[in-house]
Every structure is written in C-alpha cells, then in structure tokens.
Image (cartoon, rainbow, N blue to C red):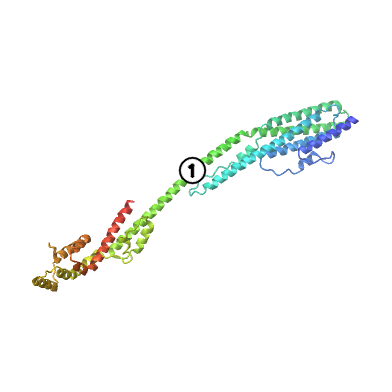
Amino acid sequence: MATSEETATDDNKTRDSLGAEGDAPDRGPTSETPEDDRARPAPATVGTGGFAAILLGGFLAGAIGYLVAYYTEFGLFEVAEDDSATAALDEISGQIGTQADRIAALETSLEEAARAAEADAAQREADSTAAIEPVPETPDYTDAIAAIESALGGVGGELEDLADRVAGLETTATLSTGTDAPATEGGDTQAADALRAQIDELAGSLSTLNARIDSLPEPADYDDEIAEIEDRIAALDTRVSEQSDAISQARADAKAETARIATQGALAEINAALGTGEPYASAVSSLDAASDVGLPDGLTAPADAGVATLRELQAAFPDAARDALPAAIGATAGDGAIDRFGAFLRAQTNARSTSEREGDGPDAILSRAEARVNDGDLAAALDEIDALPPEGQEAMSDWVDRARTRLDAVSAFESLSQSLNTN
C-alpha cells in the first residue's frame, strides 16, 4: 500500500506540473472533464503563428496531464511496477515547456523586427508623398512578415520526437492493460480504449502542428524579405530624389519664364509710351520687379510725365529756330555800324532759310539742324545747335531740353532692351 500511495502522490505532482506548463487551472479528478478544459475561452490571438503554437502546446500538455491523472486515479492500469509512462510524460512536459519558451522568445524577436521594418517603410512612404508627382506605394509585407514570424526553426523536429514519445506512451499503456488489468472488468477496458483514442487524437494534433510548421518558410527567409524591402525602399528613394530635382528645375524654369514674359511685356509698354508720349511709370515698376538689372536714370526720370514725341519736336522746331535766330545774329554781328544795321534788318524781318545750306552763320546752322530733325536724327540736330552762340542756344533751350530728354530715354531703352534680350 505504501508503494501505491507514493505512486499516486507522484502522479498527482506530475499532473499539477503538466497543468502549470499548459497554463490550465487545477482540475479535480471527478469535477471536470477534458471537454470542460477545451470549452474554456482561449486567450486573444495576436495575429501570429507563434502564439497559436504556444496555445496548442499548452492545451496538449494539459490534456495529457489530465488523462494520466485520470488513468492512474481510477486504477485503469497498474503503474506501481512500471514507471515508464510517468517518466515519459515528465519528459514530454519538460519539452513542451522548453518549446513554449523558445516560441515566445522567437516570436518577440520577430515581432520587434517586423515592427521596425513596417515603421521604416511607413516613414519612407510618408516622405515620398511630399513630392508633387505621386510615386508607387511601398508594398505591404505584413502578411509575409506574419508568416515568417510563425516560422519556428528546429521546433518541427522536436515536435516529431514528442509525437513519437506519445505513441510510445500509448504502447506502454496497452502493454500494461494486457498484463495488469483484470479481464473481468469490462468498464476498465472501455475506459482504456477511450484513453487510447484520446492519445491517438493528441498524437494526430501534434502531427498536424508539425506539418504546419514544416510548410512555413525558414527564419533565414526573413532576411531575404527584409533585403528585398530595403532594395525597394532604396529604389523609391532614388526615384523620389530624381523627381524632386526635376520638380525644382521645372519650378526654376517656370519662374524664369514668368520673369521673361513680364519683362518683355513691360518693355513693350515702355516702347509704346515713348512713341505716344504717355507716362510709363507703372511699366517701369513692373520692369524693375521682373528683372534683376538696374534701370538707367535716362529712362526712369521722365516716366511720370512721359517724353515729347518726334512729331511734336518736328512741329515745334520752326518756332524755336525763329526765337534763336535774332539772338544768334545779334551776338555774331560785327562792331561796325553797317554790320550791326544789317543784323538789325535781318532780325526785324525774322527771315531764315528753310532749306539746308552750308556756312557758319546762325541761319545756316539752324537750317542744317532743322533738316536733321526732319530726318528723325535728334542727336545730329543737337550737335548742330551746340554750334550756335550761347545767346541762340538759350533762346531755344526749352526745345533743346525736350529733345535731349527724349533722346536720352530712347537711347537708354534701346540699350536696356538689348541687354535683357541677350540674357
């Protein structure tokens, strides 16, 4: 009897140990059944194959522990003389606990790597959206990473060994039934058959789990997936960089083209104003904003009032010449009475030559100046007028100022236009 009590005590300890390894609550020998254990809600799934393996391993460990306890408590088989079944179950329990620890550690490592890869891919994708031209989204490797996380290298072989040991336990139980169980106890025989059926079911579940693990990619494949993701991200970075450069260049070209169009428009407006005599201050402001060159004073100074047109200067020259001629004649008359009297007569008649003629006298100078004005050559006309005596220049200074203002504005405009068109 002492041996039976010690065996029962050892079996109870084994049952408690196996129940703890499987994360299942303690069960009494008669109050609960394996069906109650299976009916208990499973913990929430984290979405990886590794957690499913832990859950199934814990469930199998608990079921085996319960069956052994049931098997020994009700005396279905005598194990006092043969402790091989207990030893096998102890070893199985230890292996299941070891596998659970390895699975949890591997799952943690793979989940950290997966989160890092997904975070990096998400950051790269967010950066790419800053570009104007859409770029392809980074491929979603969530499913592939989840499958890789469930790859438990080395676990498959050890689970095969675990299935073999369960089969060995079944054989031991069968031998014990044939030698120790009374033949007259029909109920015990039926219980033994049920126990063997449950052990077969557990062995089949282990085989299914083993096949599932074998079908998954090896952890080494994870490195290949990461390398592929990194290559795709690098290619995406290159494309985004190229597109960013192209966009920057396009913006610079567009800005330059906008400035060129604005400059040409302002120049056209100023040119028209020089032809009509209208003010062109707004056009000067637009030109100054559109270009990066300094505007000459000869063009900007008369912008508010405008400049005299060539036609206006041509029409006003005869009157200006008649005002200048008497003053110039008086200044050039000799000291003799005859010379001074002749100058007086010419001044009184205010007669002057209307056709160009040679000579150094005021009338000849003014005739040549008028011819240059009619030709549109204001610069040559002003050069002729500079040959008059100061008294003659002073008499027609108003016309000279208007002509010189126009000449300076037109000259500045032509130089500026040539410079801007060249650039």
Q: Determine the residue positioned at 60% across, 34% down.
A: 221
Q: Residue 417 or 80: which is nearer the viewer?
A: 417
Q: Is residue 197 above or below residue 363?
A: above
Occupied quadrant, residue 155: top right
Q: Is residue 354 visible?
A: no
Q: Is residue 340 left or right of residue 6?
A: left
Q: Is residue 80 visible?
A: yes
Q: Determine the residue positioned at 31% across, 56% down.
A: 416
Instruction: Describe the element under mark 1 as helix, strand or loop.
Output: helix
The spot of residue 206 in percent (x, y) is 72, 33
Occupied quadrant, residue 156: top right
Q: Residue 349 or 44: which is nearer the viewer?
A: 349
Among all residues in the image, which is located at the extreme bottom?
A: 348
The spot of residue 326 in percent (x, y) is 16, 71
Q: Determine the residue positioned at 77% across, 32% down.
A: 199
Few, some or many C-alpha atoms within 10 Å of disc 1 (few <14, some 14-19, many ≥20)? some
Among all residues in the image, which is located at the extreme front?
A: 335
Q: Is residue 149 left or right of residue 348?
A: right
Q: Residue 332 or 244: which is nearer the viewer?
A: 332
Q: How many marks?
A: 1
Residue type at mark 1 is: Arg
List the residue tagged with mark 1: 239
The N terminus - image quarter:
top right
Q: Is residue 88 above or below residue 229?
A: above
Q: Residue 106 or 369: which is nearer the viewer?
A: 369
Among all residues in the image, which is located at the extreme left?
A: 338
Q: Determine the residue positioned at 61% across, 33% down.
A: 220
The spot of residue 91 in percent (x, y) is 77, 31
Among all residues in the image, which is located at the extreme right?
A: 1
The spot of residue 177 in percent (x, y) is 84, 28
